Amino acid sequence: MLHVNIKKTFPHFLLDVSFTAEKGITAILGPSGSGKSLTLQCLAGLETPDEGIITLNDRPFFDAGQRVNIKPRERKIGYMFQNYALFPHLTVKQNIAFGLKGKPKAEVEEKVEKMLKNMELERYGDRYPAELSGGQQQRVALARALIIEPDVLLLDEPLSAVDPSMKETLEQQLLTFIDKHFSGVVLLVTHNLEEADRLCDRWIIYHNGSVIQLGAKEEILARPVNVTVARMLGYKNIFPVANIRPVDQGVIAVVGDSELFMKATSPSSFDFVAIHYDHLMFVENECVNTFDYDIVQTKTRMNVVEAILETKHFQLQVKVPRKEWSSFGQTKKKIHLPPEHLFFLEK
Amino acid sequence: MVESLDLFPLFLSLKVATAATVLAALIGIPIAYYLSRSHGKVADFIDALTTLPVILPPTVLGYYLLVLLGRKSPIGKFLEETFGITIVFTPVGAAIAAFVVAVPFLIKSSRAAFASIDPNLIRAAKVLGRSDINIFFVVILPLSWRGVASGIMLVFARALGDFGATLMVAGNIPNETLTMPVAIYDALLAGNHRLANVLVIIMTSVSVLLLYVMRRIEKRMVRGDGAHAARKH
C-alpha cells in the first residue's frame, strides 16, 4: 500500500495532495498542469516535497518531520516516463540492463535475457530504440522499469505519444504485460478520460495541485462531488439551484422558475443539480420532472446525435444513438429527468 | 628561400592553442553543464561573465589579465613564489589569454547541446540508480558530444587566431612568445611580405579545414543523433 501526503510550494503553484493506493492500477486523472507528473517525481525522489510523508508498505521514502529522504536509487521504483525516455544511444539490451549496474555480469545477462523473453523482445536485443515500433518501445520501457524488481510502478502518460490508430492495441498490450509481470501498486498518470476509464478501476482526480475526488471509478462517474469533476467527466446538464424543500421521499430543488423532484436527502450545502445525458428519457406521457421541449440545435456525429433541447425553464444537452433519433422525433415530445438520477453538486 | 623562413611562430601557436583548448575543455564544459541545468540569478551572472570576452575588445581583456595575473598582483605573486610560474610575457600567458578569449564559444555550444537533452532521460537514469557523475559520462556526454566537439574546434580556431589579448599579455618576443598572428603583423611591419604571405596562407588553410570539419559534424548532427542513427538504414 502506498501512502502519500505531501505539500510542495512554488511561486505560482501549490501541490497539496493526500491519497493511498492499493495493489492494482490507480489512475491519477486531471488536466495538464495540475501536478500529476510532479507527484510521481516526488514519489520517485526526483523532487523533494516541502512537507509531508510518503510511505510504501510502511517503509518510509520521505518524512519531512523525521528528516527521512531516501535517494531515488534506493527507493526501487519502476518509472515509465512520458515518451518512454529510452536512451537513444544504447541498444535495447543496454537500456534494459541500465538499472543493474554493479551486479555480477552473469546475473545481469541472465536477467536481461529473461526480461527480453517476458516482453517478447528476443529478436530486438541489439537494436536501437529508434529502430523499434511504438509498441516495442513501450515494452522496452516497461522492461527497463521492471528489471529492478520495483515495489511500485509509475506510468506517466504511457499512451500520449502513441498514434491514435495504435492506441487501443497498445493500451491492451500494456495491461496484459503489467498483469502478467507485476503485482504491486501501479499509478497511471493521464489527462485522458477514456484512457483512465479503460485502464483503471480506481481514480484520483487532480485539479490545480489538489485531489478533488478519489475512489472507485463507477462511484465517481455516478456522483462527482463538484462542478469541476462533473465537467471533467463530460457532464453538460448542470443547473444552479435557487432553493430546496424537503418533501415525502425526496427533495424538491428549485431551478429557475421550475421545480425538480429528486430522490435524495437534503444536502447540507448545495449549489447545483446535475444529471448525466445517459439518464435523460424521452417520454409521451406527463409525469414528474417532465417537460415539453423544442430542438434548438442538432449535431450529427458518427454514431450519435448531439442535440440541445429547450424547455420553458432550461436547456438540456442530449446524446442519442443515430438510429433512435429519427424514430422518436415524431412521437415523443417530452423529456423526463428521472428523480433517482438527479444529484446535488457543490461549486 | 624556404630555409630562411622561421616557423617557430606556427609551432608556438599550435602549442598555445592546444593548451588553451585543453584548459577550456576542463573549465568550460563543467560551467556549460552547470548553466544548462540552472536558471537562477547566480547562473545568469556566470552566463554574463563568461560571455563578456566575446564583446570586450581584446586589448581590454588583455589589460584585465595583466592587472589580475601580473607579477605584482596577488595571484601572479602567489604563482611565482609557490610554483615558479610567471605568466606575463611567457607562453603560459599566451595560452591563458587565448583561453579567456576563446572559452565562451565552447560554453555556448556545449550548453546548447546539454540543454537539448530530454530531462526525462536524466531522470530515468537517476531512478535507475546512477550517480550524477555517472549520468554525465554515460548519458549526457554521449548524447551531446557533437555540440561539445564543435565547440572545442571553435575554441581551437579562435585561440589559434588571437592577436590582441595575446600581444598584451605575452608580448612578441621572437622565439619565445611570438605567435602566428603577431608574427604576421611583425613581418608586415618589417616589410617581409614573403614571410607574411606564407604565414597568412598557413593560417587560412588551418582555419578553413577546421570550419569544414565542423560543418560536417553539424550536418550529421542535424541528420541523426550519432552512431545509432547511421545504422538505421
Image: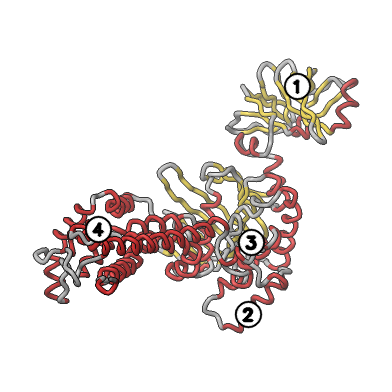
Local crowd at mark 2 within 10 Å, few (<14), some, or many (≥20)?
A: some
How far separated are the C-alphas under marks 2 and 4?
57 Å
Q: Which corner quadrant holds the N terminus of chain A? A: bottom right
Residue A206 occupies quadrant: top right
Q: Residue at x 78, y 31 (%)?
A: A319
Say which of marks 3 and 4 sits in front. Answer: 4
Q: Mark 4 points at which residue?
A: B163
Pick out the residue farthest to the front. B1
Q: SS class of the residue under badge 2?
A: helix
Q: SS class of the residue under badge 3?
A: helix
The mark found on residue B122 in the picture is: none
Q: Which residue is drawn at 72% across and 72% down?
A: A122
Give the mark, 1 or 2, whose residue is nearer the N terminus: 2
What amino acid is labelled 3 in the image?
Ala
Q: SS class of the residue under badge 4?
A: loop
Residue A7: percent from the left, percent from the top? 46, 51
Local crowd at mark 4 within 10 Å, few (<14), some, or many (≥20)?
A: many
